[in-house]
Structures are given as C-alpha cells and as structure tokens.
Image (spheres, rainbow, N blue to C red):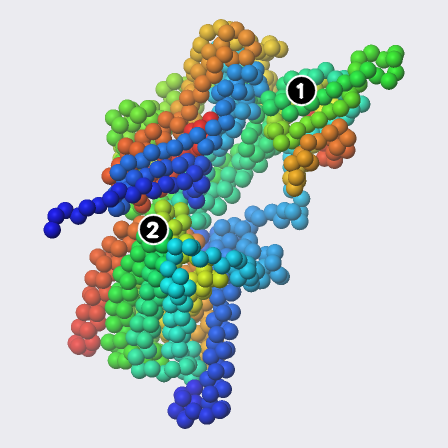
Amino acid sequence: MLGFAKGLSYTLKSMTKKKVTSRYPDEPVIMPDRFRGIQHFDPEKCIVCNQCARICPTQCINLVGKAPSDPAKKGKVIDTYDINFEICILCDLCTEVCPTEAIVMTNNFELATFSRDELFKDLKWLDANNTNVRKEQH
Amino acid sequence: MGALRTEEMILNLGPQHPSTHGVLRLVVTLDGETIKHIDPVIGYLHRGTEKIAEDLNYTQIIPYTDRMDYLSSMINNYNLVHAVETAMGLEIPERAEYLRIIVMELQRIASHLVWFGTYLLDLGAMSPFLYAFRDREHILRLFNELSGARLTYNYMRVGGLKWDVTPGWIERTAEFVSYFKKELEGYHQLVSGNRIFLNRVRDVGKITAEQAINYGMSGVILRSTGVKWDLRKDEPYSIYDRFEFDVPVSTDGDCLARYHLRMEEMKQSIRILEQALPQFPAEGEFWGKVPRVLKVPAGECYTRIEAPRGELGCYLYSEGKDKPYRLKFRRPSFVNLSILPELLIGDTVSNMIAVLGSIDIVLGEVDA
Amino acid sequence: MNQFLSQPLSLVNGSVFILSGVILLGVVLGFVTYAIYFERKIIGWMQFRIGPNRTGPLGLLQTVADVLKLLLKEDIIPAAADKPLFILAPLIAFTPAFAVLAVIPFTESLHFADMGVGILYYIAISGITTLGVLTGAWSSNNKYSLMGGMRAAAQMISYEIPLIMSLVGVILMTGSLNLVDIVKKQQEMGVWFFIPQIIGFCIFIVASLAELSRTPFDLPESESELVAGYHTEYTGFRMAFFFLAEYVYMFGMACLTTLIFLGGWLPPIAFLGFIPGIVWFIIKFCGVIFFLIWLRATMPRIRADQLMQLGWKVLLPLALVNIFLTALIKALV
C-alpha cells in the first residue's frame, strides 16, 4: 500500500515540474560545435590527395581530379566530388584526415528527402552547404 | 472418460515486437498456458560486421563497433581499441585513461537507464520510461558536446581519444552526477515498493549459479545467482584498480534480484564518477604516440571488458598487416540469450516478457 | 423531471424527453472527446512532456481528428469471420453503456428515470457489454482474439461480484437501491459513505478499475503482452464503438462513485450550499476521473493469473466481511 502511495506522489509531483519538450521544428535545435552533421566541401582547398576516399569506412566518397587550368601550377584540381548519403554514416573520419580542411562538417543534420536520388550529393551541393560550419577542426 | 487430449500450439512472437528489444523472433510451442519449447530465431539484424572488419584498418572499424550494441557505444569502442593497444603494447596517457573511465561509466548509466525504462514499459508502467529517457538526455547532451554525436560516438582511438574535453565539460558532468544521484532515489520511490511490480518479478525466471556458469552467462545475470565476478575488479583494465567501488551480488537469481542489481550498479557507477572527476588531470595528452600506420604484430590476442550487459570480448588474429586477418567479438547479449529456452520451459506465457526484459539483450549485439 | 414523468404523454412532454436525451448524448460525447484529450494531456504532464498541442488551439481538436481518421478508414471484415455477429458485437458492447445513463441523477431534480432499483439496473445492464466482447472475440475467427476476449470476459465477470457486494453495505445502511435516496441518506447522515463504508469504498475502486479495463487491470488492451485483444480484427468505425463504450462506462462509473460514496451533489460543508449542486457533482466527478488517469500513469500491469486470484481470493471475502460487519453494526446500534 505504501509503495503505491509513494509512486503516486512521485507522479503527482512530476506533473508540476518543468516540461522538457523542445518545440522542434518550430524552434530549431542548436547542436554543440563538435556535432558531426552534413559535410561542407570547399573545392578551392582540395588537393585531390584521396585520403578521405581511402579512409571512409563505407566507401561513400567518389572523387575525380583533373589537371589545373593554369599549366604552371602543380598538382591536381578537383573535378567531381560525390558523397553518397545513403551510406555515409557521418563518422567524421574524412575530415580527420584531410590535410587542407577542404572537407569539414557542419552542424546541419536535416537530410531527409522524399526520393533516394536526392541523397546523392555532388560538389555543387556540398559547396553550397556552408551554414553552421563547425569551428573546431581537430 | 479418458485423459483429455490436448494439442500443442505454435505461437510466433514475430520479429516485430511491441517490446522494444529489437528484431528477435521467438517460436514458442505452447500447451495451454505452459511453454513447452522456445526457439529464438536471430539474424534479422545481422550486418556482417566481423567480415567487413577484415577489409578495413583498425581506425576504420571503430565506427562499426559503435553500431553493435548501440546503447553502449563508448564501451564497444573501447573493446576494440583496448584489444589493439594490448596487442601492440601501447601506452596510454593519464588524461586519456581518466577520460575513458569517465565516459565509460556515464555510458553504463545511460545503458542501464534504457533497460530500466523499457523493462517497466514491458510490464505496463508507461511513466518510468520517460523519466529514464529524460535523465539519459543529459548524458547524451554531454556526449554530443564531447564527441559530436548522440548515439554512435566514434570517440576512442587506438592510443587515446579523438578530442579533448571542451571547457566546462567536467564541471557539467559533476553537476549531472549530483543531480542523478537524487533522481535514482526517485526511481526507487516510484517502482521498487510497488506491490504489483514486485508480484510480477519476484521468483520469476530463477537461475542457479551452476546453470549460469554452464551457459556462459556474465554480467548482472551471473552476479544475480551469487557468483561474484566483475571484470573491472577481477581482471582490472584501464585504471579501474585506482577506484573504490562495490560489486553488488545477490543470491536470489530471479528477475527482482537482477532489477536491484542494475539499480545498484548505476549507484556504483556514480561512485566511480565521483572519484574520477575530481582526480581528472588538469593537463596532459589525450592521444598518445602512435605510429602513422597502425600495424598489429602477427599473432592472436583476446581481451575482455565489462560491458553493461556482460563480458564483451575481442579476439584479434593478425598477420602483421594494418588490417586484421580475423576479428571476432564475444558479445554478451548473444551468449545470454542462449539460456532463454531452458529457463522458460514449464513457465507461463505471461512470465516470458518479464524474463526476456530482465536478461537485457540488444539485438544489434546479438546479431552483430 | 419527475413532474414530466408523472404527467400523461403529450407533445410537450415528449419533446422534453427527446430533447433532454439529445442533450445528455451531447454532454456524454463531449465528455468522451475531452476525457481522451485530458487523459493524454495529464499523462503527458506527469511524464515531463506536453500532450497534444498542434491540432487546433492547445490541441483541443486532437480527438476530433482521431475520430475522423477512424471513421474514414476502410471497413475490413475478415473473410472467414461470422459476418452478422461481427457487425452486431460493437453494438451489443456499446448500447448498454448509454442505456445505464438513464438512472444517474445529476442533482435532485436533474435525472431521467427515478427507478426504485437504480443500482441494480446499472449493474445488470452493464453486464451485457461482456456479451458484446465475447461476441466480438468469437466472430473474429482469430484464435488470439478469442483467447484475449475470453480473458477479458473472465476479468469482467470475476470483478462484477465484488463490485456489487461492496455496494450491499451502502444499500443496507440506506435501505433502498434508489440512487437519489442514497445521496439523501448521506445528506441526512452528514458524512459521505466513503467514511463509514471505507472497506466497501476500497473494494469498489479496485473492482471498478477492473470492470473498466483500466490500468492496472488493462490486460485486454495491453499489446506488449503476448495475445492481442478482442478487438484485433476491428478497424475504423467499429473499433471506435468499442472505445466509445469504454469511455462512456468511465463516465457512468465515475458518476456512480460520486453518487454512492462521495455524496453526489452535496457540498462538503453545509455553509457552501449556495453553490448549485451540479457544480459539486462536476467537481467530484472530475476528481474521480483524474484519479483514474493518475493511476494509469503510475501503475504497471497486473498478471492474468494474479488478477483472478485478487478478484476471487481477496476482494470477495473482504466484501463479505464488509457486509457482515455492516449488518452487525446496524443490528447492534
């Protein structure tokens, strides 16, 4: 009997306490800085070293480089860069190994679409995804 | 009038469950209300982690280990990282060790909170689930700040950790620890004295110590039968030997004993945290000196740690390359599930849910 | 109302009867809508969350949206089901729920039928719902439905006996089965029946929870247990009927509790008599409903065999003891 009374008083007291519901999507959820969200890619910084594609555990990054338009410059310039978000697990290993911070993570996480085709993001989309870029980069 | 002819009925507790254990299928042969035979069918969540691991280097396997027992990712991460470090003979800096302990004990609390909420939800009480998840939310926020994700942390690395603490993280964790200590009392107030709850779990699913050892049980199930065995005390790894904590043991062997043991374990985790947080070194490296390319010397090694569900082990067979030749995880939920057929034969259907909940399995771990 | 009933039937009379019936129907349906809404809200508050708040202002139209959804669903009748019985079962389950509301007096003058055997009528008619449950379970042609339905029926029948027995003490003290008389007797005694009949009150609360299939006795509804309930094969409109029956019974049982044990329309202190009786009735009624919701948020579910043990081995002997004691005290005093 006493056990019941104690339990009932606990729930009754909880009724008057502050609620923890967050008003998403009316209010956006602010993630901490280190949050691993969708990547942002800056083609200017990429040196086509291929480390990100090699380290990716699910092999979701595909990239192709080309010779730079200026023949005096050495190295390669990025031509296409695709991330397949059907298999990307947002593990952050690609940003960890990138020597020039060309690929960084943002704090955006809203990736849901109605069609699977839209989950295959290319260089233009990743470049344009430059809001809420993570400040702390290893 | 002769004996009444009864027929056995086969009931399929399908992979889609209202109870939140995951995709487990139980094929139950019933005679009236008594269970004659149970066949657990697993594999609905098998993703081939161990096979995939043969093609990846050790750092790349870490995100996969997150997803095995998704409720205790940090500890799974540590399992793999510890095996590699033991095989390579690496030394871990102090600060990294302390942070690892803090993070693993917080993870233990989070995992037991999920168990608490879902177990009571199975038994019909809908509120403790939300109270448990509200408190777990604090832990997830702390982890989100520390590692960048809420569930699959990918935080440990061979030789240390990926990030250092953010400013103020230790203080906030200490605040959480003192807050949670009071909340734990609240759970006992809500549930532990409730007659209805006690009638449902007392003397249900009794396991003897002999049965438990024969079936290879570990963790809370083994300790509920009277065998005092906790890898953090008996084969200390990391710096657990520096902390004072008790290992709760019971001799009843029923679901109530396991309930109380898990609640006690949360209390002991709090105790470890209360010691570790003030002792946290103010300075130090969080990632030791490791070679650029991680090559484990040829040979095999097996290490084990105490996960919230039991003994989590990692068997590593290496041929000297940067990818393992064979990586096998000894997963506690998989082994603990094997006792279910023997335990439930002769018992009624209504007790099945209570027993299944008290064994505390996570299908991600059962299937890997 | 009594004056209308004593006159011969005429146009004025008839239209008053029909109109008041429609008003009661409206009140009850409004109650059901907002009982569901408040249940979700209050359970939400007890669990640190806000309940429904998006459909309509403050979420007030949530139940309307849910009922609309149920009504718009496809009407599926299993091919091997017993069609006439399948269609009949929800009706059998829910008609008695409304029929029993005829004897409930809301105040001294505001009631429908002033039957001499009010309580007996209530308990007897509410037993017909069990038939509806069994019919639904049987006609579904699904072995799990049948098992669930039989368990539900066993629960409902087992707990009707302690329910009535607990009321016998009150009846002994009042000397009548009429609900208006019972409240008048409480007025005369100056103390509400839950104090002298405390054992009866406790038994009544437990038995009424089991009758209503509310937590902790909500085995028929529970889906995390093995067997799905008797209304597995019912969808849409027909299932809405079963749920409606449950909530209207909640209305009826709460009214009954208020009338018999909590003094009906009487104010707690005679000084506050200037506040109309109906307000007191509503306050006490809301208190009982809140208690039912509060229990649902807190308690786990009782096991099937323990449920039967509780009903037969604990509540029934206690109720008999209660009757014996009441009779003894009445004879001696």
Instruction: Check disc 1 and report its element: helix, strand or loop.
Output: helix
Q: Is residue C207 above or below residue A101?
A: below
Q: Amino acid at mark 2?
A: Lys
Residue displayed at 45% across by 37% down: B22
Residue C259 lies, in percent from the top left, at: 37, 74
Residues A76 and C57: in front is A76
Q: Is residue B24 above or below residue C47?
A: above
Q: Does mark 2 fall on the same chain as mark 1? A: no
Can you identify the residue that label 1 sits on? A53
**In the image: residue B166, left or right of residue C157:** right
The quadrant of the picture occupied by the C terminus of chain C is bottom left
Residue B239 lies, in percent from the top left, at: 46, 19
Residue C255 lies, in percent from the top left, at: 40, 71
Can you identify the residue that label 2 sits on? C143
The chain that hosts pointer 1 is A
Q: Amino acid at mark 1?
A: Ala
Residues B244 and B201: in front is B201
State the mark number for residue C25: none
Please tell me how crowded label 1 is: few (under 14), some (14-19), or many (20+) other residues with Cα within 10 Å.
some
For residue C268, what is the image quadrant?
bottom left
The quadrant of the picture occupied by the N terminus of chain C is bottom left
Considering every residue shown, the one lying at the far front of the view is C79
Residue displayed at 40% across by 77% down: C102
Residue displayed at 36% across by 19% down: B234
Disc 1 from disc 2: Cα separation:
55 Å
Please tell me how crowded label 2 is: few (under 14), some (14-19), or many (20+) other residues with Cα within 10 Å.
some
Residue B44 lies, in percent from the top left, at: 45, 32
- Eye-nearest disc, 1 or 2: 2
